[in-house]
Amino acid sequence: MAPSSESEQPGTARDLAVPVPAHVEARTGDPFVIGPGVRVVTDGSTEAVAVAVMAASRLHRLSDVPVAVLHEDDGTPGSVVLALADAATVGVPAGTDASLAHEAYRIDVTADRAVLTAVSGAGLLHAAHTLQQCAVPGAEPATWTVAPQLVVDHPRFAWRGLCLDVARHFFGVPDLLRVLDLMASLKLNVLHLHLTDDQGWRLDVPSRPALAAVSGLTAVGGDPGGYYSSQDWAQLLGYAASRHVTVVPEIDLPGHVNAALHALGELTPSGRPARAYTGIDVGFSRLHVDLPATRPFLHDVLGDVAAMTPGPWVHVGGDEVLTMEPAEYRALVRAAVEELAAAGKTVVGWQEVASALDGPPAPGEGPALEEALASAVVQYWDEREGAEEVTRAAAHGARVVLSPATRVYLDMRYDAATPVGLEWAGHVEVRDSYEWEPLDVLPGVPADRVLGVEAALWTETVRTSEDLFLLLLPRLAAVAEVAWSRADARGWDSFAARLPRQTARWDERGYTWYRSPQVPWSAGR
Ligand code: TNX
């Protein structure tokens, strides 16, 4: 937040936090003051200490006073206390799904202290972000106050994601760290990286160094490419883990593979490498099930990616294959699922894979594959088609992540004047990204099969981090609230009123954002 000399009466998290918490009670009494003497006290758990170090550096930046991290509270006013606790102590409603309770947190603010409790480090980090959003400028310079209140909060959906296309245009580790910071501040917990496409291959994998060495260099429009070395990848994963964000790598198959065909001639029928592609058409490139190099490619590359990725998920793409018979598509998708299942991963695929998931097993397919197919995650994006197939897959056990393009494709322009972006799914204003109900998207899919919501940012037209954040903000905040907050706790007017205050932090971090005419920006700042 930017320093300000005007003090104000702090409101509660209901007026200040994005996403809005499930339960907030205002308390009487004086506010908690962040200023000289403020310190962070932990219960000594590694989870709490890790969050405490981040919170202390944040409090230091806010208040400009040194902020210690201590293990004991001497009882004098000014402690921000971080401690793990069981779900009942946190106050999670009985019967809450364990994966959701895991991220729950509680904040008790009195004049003397702010006590943050959670079941996990993820919950403590969420609590710290909510507390920060509740701090408003105090009476003295460089002091901040937080209203006395009780917050008890947990997410509505377990999967709250952002898919970022780093294949059409490359974004390096420093940009991704900024994206991760933004995601964590909005309580988003899945960064899905679209690492490969026709225009580029962005992850160096040990079994096929030519992929990154050759196709790491290309990008849309002849722009500079780039790729993540294994060290870059480890740095990214470590940073994401410390922010409690899971990285889901996507290797897009069996279409969107021109970059692989350009680097590895053995994947083409002629044996000659395909020419580099720097346009933005889709659907023309493909693997061939009957080439001898294809299965070893799937085995080695997916095995490498699985081994390089600590999270449970690997995404196999599967979208927009326009030049292949269904039988070959099905065989290639099932081969990819089989390789990833053998490597211990759960498969995620775009909605098109739904058609390949069910049906009778082919010769040689075993029970392990059946199980992997049934537990796959299907990502719904194109509302013009596929609802039936996805609904059927869900009935057979698949879980669904919702990315309806007309709501959460953040590469769509806000309006005709937006300087970058596409328009095939229409214009997507902030309110479009906000005002929708996930369970209404696929009415035939039972609520317990909906794993969550994911925004997507495709980068055909996105060349700089300024373009990137302009498209993300403020819509990513809208999607985050859809994914986190209970339907009956949120509403557009409240969201639009809470949004302007978030921009001080965006400005401080150098994120560009779109000044949507739908939001009363000058109010409440
Ligand atoms: C569709 S969404 C695609 C991408 C494009 C995007 C542009 C999906 C699975 N495929 O290849 O980049 O539209 O909005």
Image (spheres, rainbow, N blue to C red):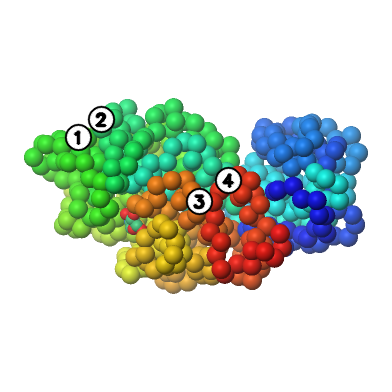
The answer to whether the residue bearing label 3 lies less than 8 angstroms from the nearest atom of ligand 1 is no
What residue is at 83 percent from the left and 55 percent from the top?
Answer: 7
Q: Residues within 10 Å of mark 2 (few under 14, many from 20)?
A: some
Label 4: which residue? 510
CA distance for labels 1 and 3: 34 Å
Label 2 vs 4, first from the N-terminus: 2
In the rendering, at what x and y percent does residue 339 appear? 30, 40
Counting residues from the N terminus, which is met first, the one under dot 3 or under dot 4?
Answer: 3
Judging by the rendered image, the residue that carries numbered circle 1 is 264
Mark closer to the chain start, 1 or 4? 1
SS for callout 2: helix
* Label 3 SS: helix
- According to the picture, the residue beneath numbered tag 2 turns out to be 210
Q: Amino acid at mark 2?
A: Ala
Q: Is residue 500 visible?
A: yes
Is label 1 or label 3 in front? 3
Instruction: Name the quarter showing ligand 1.
Output: bottom left
Q: Amino acid at mark 3?
A: Phe
| Residue 36 picture quarter | top right
**Left or right: 93 as drawn, with respect to 450:** right
Residue 469's disc number: 3
Mark 1 / mark 3, whichever is N-terminal: 1
Judged from this view, the residue extending furthest toward the left is 270
Depth-wise, is mark 1 or mark 4 nearer the camera? 4
Return the x and y of residue 170 as percentages of the image width and height: 38, 41
Quadrant where the C terminus sits is bottom right
* Gap between marks 3 and 4 measured at Cα: 9 Å
